[in-house]
Image: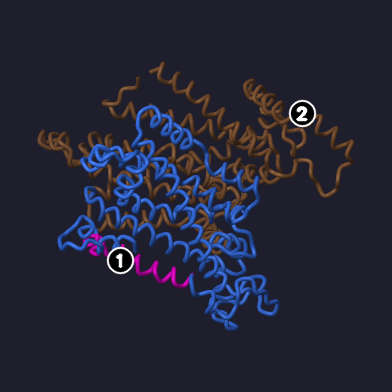
Chain colours: A brown, B blue
Amino acid sequence: MLRYIGRRLLVAIPTLFLVITAAFFMMRAAPGSPFDSDRKLLPEIEANVLAQYGMNKPLGQQYVDYLAGVAKGDLGPSLKYRDKSVLDILNENYPVSLKLGLSAILIASIVGVSLGVIAALRQNRMADNVVMAVAILGVCIPTFVTAPLLVLVIASKLGWLPTAGWNDGALANLVLPVTVLALPQIAIISRLTRAGMIEVLSANYIRTARAKGLPESLIVRKHALRAAILPLVSYLGPACAGLITGSLVVEKIFNLPGLGKFFVISALQRDYTVVMGMVIFYAALILVLNLLADLLYAVLDPRVRLA
Amino acid sequence: MSLSATASAPAVKGRSLWDDARRRLLRNRAAVASVAALALLVAAAAVGPYLVPFTYDQVNKADVWLPPLTGGHLLGTDALGRDLLARLLTGLRVSLAIGLVATLVSLVIGVAWGATAGYVGGKLDEAMMRIVDVLYSLPFIFFVILLMVTFGSNIVLIFVAIGAVEWLTMSRIVRGQTLTLKNKEFVEAARAAGLGRTAIVARHIVPNLLGPVVVYVTLTIPAVILAESFLSFLGLGVQPPMASLGVLIAGGASDMELAPWLLVFPSLVMVVTLMCFNFIGDGLRDAIDPKDR
């Protein structure tokens, strides 16, 4: 097990390296520089600024320097936010995105699995049809449609919840963004659970369990569910990628101080180091989550042996 | 649709697999209704802009913020007095076009990549699919955003960027199918007849991949439309005054307190379009690959 984890982490290094390389050169190929502003800098001053950030060296040398920094855990200073390093920005803002993302995935899993199980147990009946119709809607209504509509109705017209803002993560401020983030995931998770459950319920070992005279609720909870949510576990990685994408929109609409906001702004402002820092952060996050998903898979399915 | 065209082609009477598939598809009411609705939407996007007496970028300072059904504007106007119906039809056209072209890009890359990896096999297969695995584990939206920032948001780049993201799943599906196909007798016969690798892949493998590929294409188009709208929403996709569904929704969202119709109508069109594609995709999957039923 430990050896497996170690090897997976080793394999992750070249992947990260690729990500860093691609992002670095793409960012630098973009026209413009972080020091462009309305007032043109004097050439001497500009040269000084460039020299201060090591940007007067050849690009290849800068790339090597950057890699060396990353290897030491130093992501460099932000080029736009004076007096802040990239690590400061990540540290200050990732808790917001994390809280949003984790709440959303937790709620989506609980609601989605419950709905999926109900649909599977009532296959082709009313409850099933309702759940599946809702699931299709959930997949088809994008985050940037649900978010403004919910704000318009629940926050603006009815005044039940605040329209935007973080307010130190108060519950009332969390409800709408988390709902918006969770909805598409609920849709996908309930479909996956339903499909898995229907397949599992016709398996031989479930028939055996029934023949033993176990109560149906126990069969569903202990025997079927465990196998039925396996496809869900492998969906975890893509789900998190989806949440990251979603949170770019949600953080913008609800004006939340998360990381998502920084990415687009920093990319547009050519804040090279911040963009690189975020790409590395998210790529590492996804790699770790994929590893966790595989480990969880092995725990749930005794047939899978990690080697 | 290409499916029915293929199904009616054989001269010999009899029930081919495609006949069965068509029969099953026609029994699926949601899918049939979606085909009809989608046909209407496509027709509206194609000819609609010529029938509306306004153009999508026609500014009219006298008629700003008109609610629907006033001043000759069926769906009202926006902050610049532009007719929403004209913008909506143009936006739908742009979104559909991006959906189709980007899907085509992903189709070409995905089929070529997957079929090659699957048919050649061995070390090459391993290396090619390893690349796909690595790309899968990246936060792709970031790279699309970087691409847009790097090269500026022009429409051709949107096609390429989104298409280049969406080919991964396609290549996996195609590879899996190719692996099962390549040991079939007809491929062996072609090999015995002295056909080269390229010819076998192009003439015998790829045409037989059609079923799963058609299904996945219908599911990729809505994904692409979503991706484009997402970019437009962040201000990185289609640039105003040009319209796409994403541009319109983004604009509507910022003006929704004052003019809710600017958000509601584009959202509605977007949701209906995506639902049609999803129902058709699901219906095709059930029809072509009935083992899930």
For the question of whether residue A166 can be seen, the reply is: no
Q: Which residues are drawn in magenta?
A: B22-45
Q: Is residue B237 magenta?
A: no
In front here: B168 or A277? B168
Could you tell me which quadrant the N terminus of chain A lies in? top left
Left or right: where does residue A137 sit relative to residue A260? left
Left or right: where does residue A161 sit relative to residue A127? right
Residue B165: give x, y in percent of width and height.
49, 45
Which chain is home to disc 1? B
In front here: A234 or B24? B24
Could you tell me which quadrant the C terminus of chain A lies in? top left
Q: Circle 2: is it few (<14), some (14-19), or many (20+) Cα within 10 Å?
A: few
In the rendered image, the residue lying farthest to the front is: B194
| The image quarter in which residue A156 lies | bottom right
Q: Is residue A177 above or below residue A206?
A: below
Residue found 63% across the figure and 42% down from its top: A263
On whether disc 1 and disc 2 are found on a single subunit, the reply is: no
Residue found 69% across the figure and 80% down from its top: B62
Q: Is residue B24 magenta?
A: yes
Q: Which mark is residue B32?
A: 1
**Which residue does the numbered mark 2 point to in the structure image?**
A57
Which amino acid does the dot numbered 1 rest on? Val
Q: Is residue A28 above or below residue B101?
A: above
Residue B225: give x, y in percent of width and height.
48, 56
Q: Circle 1: is it few (<14), some (14-19), or many (20+) Cα within 10 Å?
A: some
In the rendered image, the residue lying farthest to the top is: A3
Which amino acid does the dot numbered 2 rest on? Lys
Q: Circle 1 sits in a helix, a strand or a loop, which is it?
A: helix
The residues bearing labels 1 and 2 have C-alpha atoms spaced at a distance of 62 Å
Residue A244: give x, y in percent of width and height.
52, 42
In front here: B115 or B158? B115
